[in-house]
């Protein structure tokens, strides 16, 4: 009886220690569209829906395994022509491509 209990205990322990689930080969944030969705989801509760809406469209750039997602300055001239600069800052988030954790996020002034 002790051997059966020991065997069952070892099986439960092995199952708990063995990683389970699926890890996508391209990471959980495999493309720019997904990175933007993740960024907007975490930025909205912090900075507010009106602010995040006013900074659309968001753009995502991949450097190594880190996505940097940033908004567009909320002035009509900049949205129409990206060569125009406006005063102010935008929301930015850095996201891990591999596991989607938020490395950092901030809003410029």
Image (cartoon, rainbow, N blue to C red):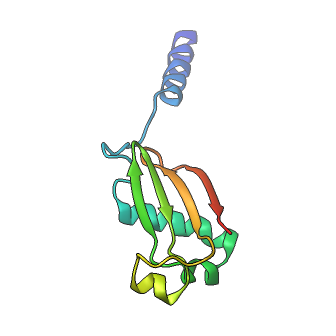
Q: Residue at x 58, y 11 (%)?
A: 2
- x%, y% of residue 34? 40, 63
Q: Residue furthest top?
A: 3
Task: Decide if residue 28 is in sight here.
Answer: no
Q: Is residue 67 left or right of residue 52?
A: left
Q: Quadrant of the C terminus?
A: bottom right
> Depth check: 40 or 88 in front?
88
> Depth check: 100 or 107 in front?
107
Task: Decide if residue 40 is in sight here.
Answer: yes
Q: Residue furthest front?
A: 84
Q: Is residue 57 left or right of residue 6?
A: left
Q: Is residue 64 above or below residue 2?
A: below
> Depth check: 88 or 23 in front?
88
- x%, y% of residue 50? 63, 84
Q: Is residue 33 left or right of residue 14?
A: left
> Depth check: 5 or 83 in front?
83
- x%, y% of residue 36? 45, 66
Q: Residue at x 54, y 86 (%)?
A: 75
Q: Residue at x 56, y 17 (%)?
A: 5
Q: Is residue 70 above or below residue 28?
A: below
Q: Is residue 59 above or below residue 49?
A: above
Number of marks in the image? 0
Q: Toward which corner of the image does residue 82 lie, by quadrant?
A: bottom left
- x%, y% of residue 20? 43, 37
Q: Quadrant of the N terminus?
A: top right
Q: Residue furthest bottom?
A: 76
């Amino acid at each position: 009886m002790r051997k059966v209990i020991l065997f069952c205990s070892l099986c439960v322990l092995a199952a708990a220690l063995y990683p389970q689930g699926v890890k996508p080969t391209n990471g959980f944030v495999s493309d720019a569209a997904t990175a933007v969705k993740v960024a907007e989801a975490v930025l909205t509760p912090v900075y507010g829906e009106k602010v995040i809406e006013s900074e659309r469209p968001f753009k995502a750039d991949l450097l190594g395994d880190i996505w940097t997602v940033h908004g567009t300055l909320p002035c009509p001239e900049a949205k129409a022509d990206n060569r125009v600069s406006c005063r102010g800052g935008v929301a930015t988030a850095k996201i891990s491509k591999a596991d989607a954790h938020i490395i950092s996020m901030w809003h410029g002034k």
